[in-house]
Amino acid sequence: MTMKKFKASIRRFLLLLCFSLTAMPFAFSQSIAEATTTAPTLVIDVWSAGKMPGNAAVEPEAEMPDRGDKVQRITNISRPTLSVFPAQNKNATAVIICPGGGYNYVTYNKEGVEVAEWLNSLGITALVLKYRTPQNREGAFQDLQRALSLTRANAKKWKIDGKRIGVIGFSAGGHLAAKASNLFENRSYSPVDQVDKKNSRPDFVILVYPAYLERDGKIATELNLKAKIPPTLIVHNEDDKTFIAGSKIYHAALDEAKVQNTFLLYQTGGHGYGLRSTKDVGAWTKDAAEWLKKNKFRN
């Protein structure tokens, strides 16, 4: 190679290097932007300081290691919170979101924040509940009942309709939502302040691939089908072999009890998909939005 050609090669290399270095900050910024999710305008404690009933976690709250699926799993929750994602319209419907996680953790982004963004797009104020884990079903239910009363107590301040407050739950969160719709007549803890004078009955519930609704082919004993259960939407799919039986049994029981309910049954989707499924069940958000509108739970 001649000296002239060598110098030309060096110039091309340097130009390419400069271009790459210039482009890197843009590419990095773009990836950060794509990973950013909507932030709540308000995060509040479900319980007043020192007033939380029941048990707390033994270990400090922690985010579990990533499994390569971009799911944020939070465990050892001892300080339950409500993250408020308000709708822009006044007097909006409000929905408390109960993520799943088998009561071991809370899938905070996939079945929480992402769901809040979808509800906001429908003009609904969303509130993500970070309830107590791990394996603290009693504490988690106390957290949800308190969250319902807390939302009603703040209805005017948060510009929501106090008569249109629902719950949507995923997997274990669906079990929580079903319990809230069944067991509101008796509060699961002694009232701690004025907030607990507000009703803890949801005005409607949406159960998405709910878990633990049946035992040995029968309705789970903790559920009370004699209660004044609010309108219920059940979302599930046939290939969720572990939990589909519970939804079918629960739907049949609601029909027998003459409770207003709709069962959206799809063929494929598995379990734990949230809003991310590309299978048949991916249509559930559109169908659920229509159900909400038909029943006047959204404008």
Image: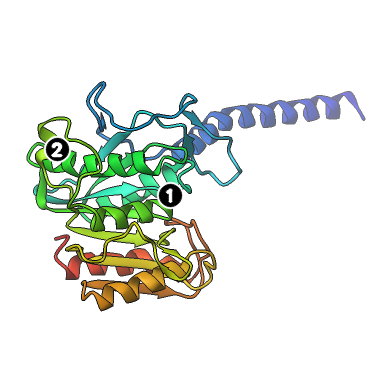
User: Residue placed at 14% from the left, 65% from the top?
Assistant: 296
Above or below residue 75? Residue 127 is below
Front residue of 263/115: it is 263
Residue pointed to by mark 1: 100
Q: x and y percent of residue 200 in the render?
A: 17, 47
User: Residue placed at 26% from the left, 78% from the top?
Assistant: 256
Amino acid carrying label 1: it is: Gly
- Is residue 21 found left or right of 73 in the rendered image? right
Above or below residue 265? Residue 135 is above
User: Residue placed at 35% from the left, 38% from the top?
Assistant: 139
Amino acid carrying label 2: it is: Asp
Rendered image quadrant of residue 138: top left
Q: x and y percent of residue 130 in the render?
A: 36, 38
Q: Secondary structure at mark 2?
A: helix
Residue pointed to by mark 2: 196
Q: Nearer the viewer, mark 1 or mark 2?
A: 2
Q: Secondary structure at mark 1?
A: loop
Q: x and y percent of residue 177 in the render?
A: 31, 54
Binning the other alpha carbons within 10 Å of mark 2 as few (below 14), some (14 to 19) or many (20 upward) gives: many
Seen as rendered, the residue at the extreme top is 50
Give the Cα distance between marks 1 and 2: 25 Å
Asked whether the viewer can see residue 154, the reply is no
User: Residue placed at 49% from the left, 32% from the top?
Assistant: 29
- Is residue 129 found left or right of 58 in the rendered image? left
Above or below residue 170? Residue 130 is above
Rendered image quadrant of residue 203: bottom left
Front residue of 70/263: it is 263
Q: Dividing the image into 4 quarters, which one contains the N terminus? A: top right
Asked whether the viewer can see residue 213, the reply is yes
- Is residue 201 found left or right of 71 in the rendered image? left
Q: x and y percent of residue 251 in the render?
A: 33, 73
